[in-house]
Image: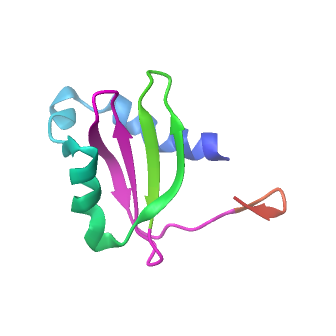
Amino acid sequence: MKAVLFFCAFVPFMLAPASLHSQIPCGHKGDMREWLKPYNEVPFAEGISQDGEAVQFLVSPGGTFSILSTRVDGISCLIIAGTDFQVLDVFGRKI
């Protein structure tokens, strides 16, 4: 299921026009986490992308979520953010 969520989150981004990519907020990882502090989001899941970037999924008790992608040089970009996050029951257990 995590793979499906990852696929759904990143395919639209990868297919977006180049002009959109230049508008994505990026900065040092610590600065980006500080920028997201008002949303009270904490890390929920993480992994390494095929190109070696660290991908982190942050969520809040209020249902907001953000996905950050961090390059090997420490620069993080906000890939997507949204609301109404919920944990799904898959195969009889919460994931």
Q: Quadrant of residue 19?
A: top left
Q: Identify the residue at the far bottom of this view.
A: 62
Residue 83 to residue 4: above or below: below
Which residue is depicted at the point 29% across and 56% down?
33
| Residue nearest the viewer, comparing 3 with 35 | 35
Q: Quadrant of residue 4?
A: top right
Q: Is residue 91 left or right of residue 77?
A: right
| Residue nearest the viewer, comparing 19 with 28 | 28
Residue 30 to residue 83: above or below: above
Q: Is residue 36 left or right of residue 54?
A: left
Q: Quadrant of residue 74?
A: top left
Colour scheme: rainbow
| Residue nearest the viewer, comparing 94 with 36 | 36
Q: Does 32 lie within the magenta span? A: no
Magenta stretch in the rendered image:
60-88
Residue 18: horizontal and vertical position, in percent?
20, 27
Residue 12: horizontal and vertical position, in percent?
39, 38
Residue 59: horizontal and vertical position, in percent?
46, 64
Which residue is depicted at the point 35% across and 50% down?
80
Which residue is depicted at the point 50% across and 66% down?
85
Q: Identify the residue at the far right of this view.
A: 92
Which residue is depicted at the point 62% across and 40% down?
3
Residue 5: horizontal and vertical position, in percent?
56, 47
Quadrant of the frame with the C terminus: bottom right
Q: Is residue 50 left or right of residue 66?
A: right
Please tell me how many numbered marks the rendered image carries.
0
